[in-house]
Image (cartoon, grey):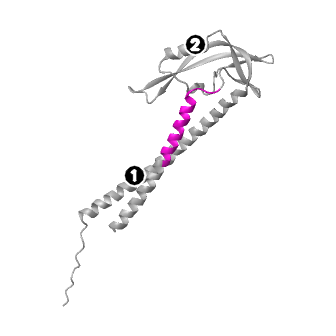
Amino acid sequence: MSSSTKTPQPQRSGASASSSAIVQDKRELSKALFILGPATMVLGLVLLAAMIFQLSRADQTQDWLETEGVITSHRVTRSFVGTRSSTERANYIPRATFTYQVNGQRFTGQQYTIGASMQTFPTALQARGYLRKEFPEGGRMAVYYNPRDPQDAVLKRGGGGDLKWITVAAVLITLLGLWLVWTAVRLRRTALKLSTIAS
């Protein structure tokens, strides 16, 4: 009568279990970054494309034709940054409405410069003060209009001061997205190496 001998099964060591946990964590983080990275990069590229378009339009205003216009009214709008909570911060956007004529035809404009909606102030008082100083209501000012589309006009050539800063931010967001993707690739490679060693 033959007796069968059982081969002892090797027990998984604590170091091996710890290594497997690290590999799993790196894989999970890599997956998350592979989603977050491209999304961040796309956001940055879309914003960058929009800013390049706005900067191009701002540059074109240097060649627009000039006529005389009248500031007809002011208003300040409010926008919120963040969620509606105690940490919510409001920004105030100054807006000026003006009228002008081109070849006997009357037009109304509301964009005092390219990217005007991106120029904000921390308080409504500051926004109103800016309007009173730069565009006094009832005052006559030079209006610069697009000869190809006379209803496209501004009171100031060039663009709002925030255009360049937002463009820089768009570049940084795009670079952040690239860095997240690169980090995800590194994590995946590290997880693969650790998995090979552990096996």
As shown in the figure, which amino acid type bears the numbered disc 2?
Lys
Task: Name the residue that disc number 2 marks.
Answer: 133
Percent position of residue 3, x then y:
19, 86
Q: Which residue is at 63% across, 24% downward?
A: 113
Residue extent of the magenta highlight = 158-178
Q: Residue furthest right?
A: 103
Task: Kindly indicate whether the residue at mark 2 contacts the one at mark 1 (C-beta within 8 angstroms).
Answer: no
Task: Indicate whether residue 28 is drawn in magenta.
Answer: no
Residue 65 in the image, given as x and y percentages of width and height:
75, 23
Indicate the quadrant containing the C terminus: top left, top right, bottom left or bottom right: bottom left
Q: Which residue is mark 1?
A: 29
Name the foreground residue: 9 vs 182.
182
Q: Quadrant of residue 140?
A: top right
Q: Secondary structure at mark 2?
A: helix
> In the picture shown, does residue 113 fall above or below 138?
below
**In this image, 190 relative to 13: left or right?**
right
- Judge by depth and name the residue closer to the eye, 58 or 29: 58
> Where, quadrant-wise, is the N terminus in this rendering?
bottom left
Residue 183 location in percent, x, y?
44, 52
In the image, is residue 129 above or below residue 11?
Answer: above
157 left or right of 148?
Answer: left
> Could you tell me which residue is drawn at 44 percent across and 50 percent down?
33
Image location of residue 120, percent across then percent down: 52, 23
Rendering quarter of residue 71 = top right
- What amino acid is found at the position of numbered circle 1 in the picture? Leu
Q: Secondary structure at mark 1?
A: helix
The residue that appears at 71% across and 22% down in the rendered structure is 144
Q: Nearer the viewer, mark 1 or mark 2?
A: 2
Q: Which residue corresponds to the image point at 62% horizontal and 37% vertical from the top-left?
A: 52
Does the magenta run of residues contain 166? yes
Q: Estimate the spatial distance between the alpha carbons at disc 1 and disc 2, rounded to whole Å.
A: 53 Å
